[in-house]
Image (cartoon, grey):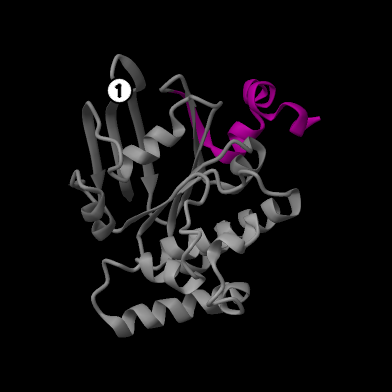
């Protein structure tokens, strides 16, 4: 079943066309990756899906219904965005960041339950509840950003460059976390990632975005073994 369907999506920044006729589908319970070089339009795509950027034309269907334009309403529909660069609130404590992720939830008991569930999933955050988020390491900040996104209990998580700026061992832990979230919680994940090798090894399905256009798509393992993909996107990683 298609949880998210993007049809003929066009996005422009003034005269610059950032996305040109993008079509993609995300099946419920899957991990779908979008790979591509810097400037390909990957972040623009996620920003459009979450309501930060308004499309010029095309349609976005979530659970068979057109998404509202406003970002706050999109969150209520069940889509959470974990942005590139984490974008945590550095002056807030860890707990305050988590509570900010649940601002659409009116039931305090439910918020408390979700917060406790995040602390159980991320023990290192539980140990530092009242610590300012800006003092965390890059990997810890990424965990917090993901936990904050989960506080709204989304059906779809938009995850933008989770490995950015992290050490290799931390990157490995982050990708294991993404898989665990899908496998244990049944969440659907749309992953934008420059580490093509890890993204393709993790995902069920993938799209290759170049200059705002989807140029190739297929199962993750199939694209991982595609000579053109290996040459263009794996490079030294594949040596």
Q: Is residue 158 left or right of residue 221?
A: left
Residue at the far bottom in the pictured view: 109
Question: Residue 239 sits in which quadrant?
Answer: top right
Q: Position of residue 209 (x, y in %)?
A: 47, 26
Of 183 and 119, the residue lying toward us: 119
Q: Position of residue 203 (x, y in %)?
A: 55, 46
Q: Position of residue 124 (x, y in %)?
A: 63, 73
Q: Is residue 77 left or right of residue 79?
A: left
Q: Position of residue 65 (x, y in %)?
A: 18, 48
| Residue 68, magenta (yes or no) | no
Residue at the far top in the pictured view: 15
At horizontal 61% and vertical 62% (from top left) the residue drawn is: 135
Q: Residues within 10 Å of mark 1 (few under 14, many from 20)?
A: some
The secondary structure that dominates the magenta segment is: helix
| Residue 154 to residue 12: above or below | below
Of 223 and 118, the residue lying toward us: 118
At horizontal 46% and vertical 68% (from top left) the residue drawn is: 185
At horizontal 49% and vertical 24% (from top left) the residue drawn is: 39
Of 106 and 210, the residue lying toward us: 106
Q: Secondary structure at mark 1?
A: strand
Residue at the far right in the pictured view: 239
Total marks shown come to: 1
Q: Is residue 41 left or right of residue 177?
A: left
* Magenta extent: 214-239
Question: Residue 59 sits in which quadrant?
Answer: top left
| Residue 69 to residue 122: above or below | above
Q: Which residue is mark 1?
A: 12
| Residue 235 to residue 197: above or below | above
At horizontal 30% and vertical 67% (from top left) the residue drawn is: 103
| Residue 232, magenta (yes or no) | yes
């Amino acid at each position: 079943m298609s949880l998210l369907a993007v049809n003929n999506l066009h996005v422009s920044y003034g005269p610059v066309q950032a996305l040109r006729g993008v079509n993609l589908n995300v099946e419920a319970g899957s991990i779908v990756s979008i790979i591509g070089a810097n400037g390909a339009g990957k972040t623009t795509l996620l920003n459009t899906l979450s309501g930060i950027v308004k499309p010029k034309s095309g349609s976005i269907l979530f659970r068979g219904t057109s998404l509202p334009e406003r970002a706050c309403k999109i969150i209520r529909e069940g889509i959470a965005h974990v942005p590139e660069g984490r974008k945590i609130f550095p002056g807030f404590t860890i707990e305050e960041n988590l509570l900010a992720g649940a601002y659409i939830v009116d039931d305090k008991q439910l918020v408390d339950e979700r917060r406790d569930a995040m602390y159980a999933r991320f023990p290192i955050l539980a140990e530092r509840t009242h610590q300012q988020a800006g003092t965390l390491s890059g990997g810890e900040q990424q965990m917090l950003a993901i936990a904050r996104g989960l506080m709204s209990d989304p059906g779809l998580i938009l995850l933008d460059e989770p490995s950015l700026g992290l050490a290799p061992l931390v990157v490995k832990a982050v990708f294991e976390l993404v898989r665990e979230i899908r496998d244990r919680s049944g969440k659907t994940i749309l992953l934008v990632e420059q580490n093509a090798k890890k993204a393709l090894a993790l995902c069920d399905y993938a799209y290759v975005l170049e200059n705002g256009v989807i140029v190739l798509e297929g199962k993750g393992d199939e694209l991982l073994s595609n000579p053109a993909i290996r040459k263009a996107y794996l490079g030294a990683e594949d040596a």
